[in-house]
Image (tube, rainbow, N blue to C red):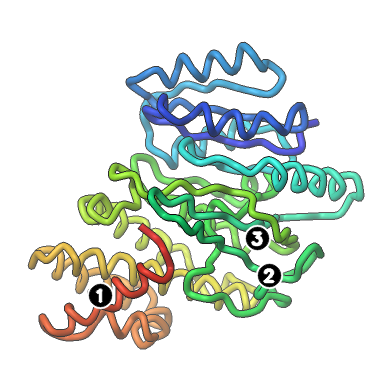
C-alpha cells in the first residue's frame, strides 16, 4: 500500500523537473510519484519515461494531450492509489527532513485507524533574488501536532491562507466529493484548496517547512504581467468559486467564514489586476465581475463589498484606482507574492 501519491503536472518542464522528482524520490516505496506529461513539446516525456524505467515501483509516467494544469491534476488523481494525495508543481520541490517527518506521521495515522481528511504543513517562498526566504506557517492559527476540526481554528492573517502547497488530502475524499478541475485554465490551484473544504472534517497540522515554492520566473503564471495577460482566466476561476459557494451547504460556521475570506482575496486579486492593466475594457470587466457576484449570491456580495479589501477595490475614479494600486504595492512588499 502506498501512503502518499504525488502528482507532478508537467508542461515543457525539462529544465527543472528533475530537481522536483529527485526531492520526492527520498520517500522511497511509501510514495507513488505520478509525472503527468501534459502534451509537452520538449524533452519532458523522455525524462518522465526515464524515471519510470529507473524506479518502476515508485514512478508512473502518464502522457496526455495538452489539457492544462487542472486536467493534469485530474489525471494524477485518477491514477493515484495512495491513501493520501499531494500536488507538487514541476518547478517546485520539497524539503527532505520535513518530507520524511510527514510520511512517518501519515503512516502512523493509517496504522492507528484514525480518520484524516487533510494534513497541513508550512511552505517557503523560494523567490528569485530574495535573500530572505519567507515562510508561511500556521502555528498561530492551527493546533500543532494534534487532530482538530474547523471549530478549533483561529484567525488567519491576509498572507496566511491555505494554498495548494500547504495541503495533503485523503485521496478518497477527493474522489468521492465530485472534485474536478476545469481544463485549459490557469489558477485552478485556488479551486483545489476551496471546493473540497466543506467535506473536510478531521485535520492535522505539522509545523515543518515542507514545500518549497519557486517564484520569480518571468514566465510564471503568478508573474504580474502574465496575470494581467491571463486575467480572463483569473476571472473564470473566481466565478467558478463564487458559483460553488453556498452558505446553506457549508455546515461549519468557521469553514464558511474561511471560504468567504478566501473569496474576498480572489475578488481583490482579480480586481487589482484589472485596475493595474490600465485599460477601459478591463475597468469594465472589474465592474462586471462585481455585478456577477451580486446577481449570483447577494448575501456573499454584501459580505465582500464592504470589507476593507472589497471597499478599496471599488473606490471611484482615477484617484480611487491610484489608491488601490498603492495599497497593492505595499501589500506586495510585505507579503512577498509575485
Quadrant (top left, top right, bottom left, bottom right) of the N terminus:
top right
Where is residue 253 drawn, in percent x and y? 62, 79
Residue placed under numbered mark 2 in the picture: 139
Secondary element type, mark 2: loop
Quadrant (top left, top right, bottom left, bottom right) of the C terminus:
bottom left
Where is residue 9 drawn, in percent x and y? 48, 34
Secondary element type, mark 3: helix
The residue lying toward the viewer, choosing from 43 and 119, is 43
Determine whether 320 is above or below 101 in the image.
Answer: below
The disc at residue 291 is 1
- In the picture, measured across the screen, residue 196 lies left or right of residue 132, that is right
Residue under the point 31% across and 56% down: 234
The disc at residue 318 is none
Q: Residue furthest left?
A: 280
Q: CA distance from mark 3 to mark 1?
A: 29 Å
Where is residue 137 drawn, in percent x and y? 61, 64
Where is residue 226 drawn, in percent x and y? 25, 50
Residue placed under numbered mark 3 in the picture: 199
Secondary element type, mark 1: helix
Amino acid at each position: 500500500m502506498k501512503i502518499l501519491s504525488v502528482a507532478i503536472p508537467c508542461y515543457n518542464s525539462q529544465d527543472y523537473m528533475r530537481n522536483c522528482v529527485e526531492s520526492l524520490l527520498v520517500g522511497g516505496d511509501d510514495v507513488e510519484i505520478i509525472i503527468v506529461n501534459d502534451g509537452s513539446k520538449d524533452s519532458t516525456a523522455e525524462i518522465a519515461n526515464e524515471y519510470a524505467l529507473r524506479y518502476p515501483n515508485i514512478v508512473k509516467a502518464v502522457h496526455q494531450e495538452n489539457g492544462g494544469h487542472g486536467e493534469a491534476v485530474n489525471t494524477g488523481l485518477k491514477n493515484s492509489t495512495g491513501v493520501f494525495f499531494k500536488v507538487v508543481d514541476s518547478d517546485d520541490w520539497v524539503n527532505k527532513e520535513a518530507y520524511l517527518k510527514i510520511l512517518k506521521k501519515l503512516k502512523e495515522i493509517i496504522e492507528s485507524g484514525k480518520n484524516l481528511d487533510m494534513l497541513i504543513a508550512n511552505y517557503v517562498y523560494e523567490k528569485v533574488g530574495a535573500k530572505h526566504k519567507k515562510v508561511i506557517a500556521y502555528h498561530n492559527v492551527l493546533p500543532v501536532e494534534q487532530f482538530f476540526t474547523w471549530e478549533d481554528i483561529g484567525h488567519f492573517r491576509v498572507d496566511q491562507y491555505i494554498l495548494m502547497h500547504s495541503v495533503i488530502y485523503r485521496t478518497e475524499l477527493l474522489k468521492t466529493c465530485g472534485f474536478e478541475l476545469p481544463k485549459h485554465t490557469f489558477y485552478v490551484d485556488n479551486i483545489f484548496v476551496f471546493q473540497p473544504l466543506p467535506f473536510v472534517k478531521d485535520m492535522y497540522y505539522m509545523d515543518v517547512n515542507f514545500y518549497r515554492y519557486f517564484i520569480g520566473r518571468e514566465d510564471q503564471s503568478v508573474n504580474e504581467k502574465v496575470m494581467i495577460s491571463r486575467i480572463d482566466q483569473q476571472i473564470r476561476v473566481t466565478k467558478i468559486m463564487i458559483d460553488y459557494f453556498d452558505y446553506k451547504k457549508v455546515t461549519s460556521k468557521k469553514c464558511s467564514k474561511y471560504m468567504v475570506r478566501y473569496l474576498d482575496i480572489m475578488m481583490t486579486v482579480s480586481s487589482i489586476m484589472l485596475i493595474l492593466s490600465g485599460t477601459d475594457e478591463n475597468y469594465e470587466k472589474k465592474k462586471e465581475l462585481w455585478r456577477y457576484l451580486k446577481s449570483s449570491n447577494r448575501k456573499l456580495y454584501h459580505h465582500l463589498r464592504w470589507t476593507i479589501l472589497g471597499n478599496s477595490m471599488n473606490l471611484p475614479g482615477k484617484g480611487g484606482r491610484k489608491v488601490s494600486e498603492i495599497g497593492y504595492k505595499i501589500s506586495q512588499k510585505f507579503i512577498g507574492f509575485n
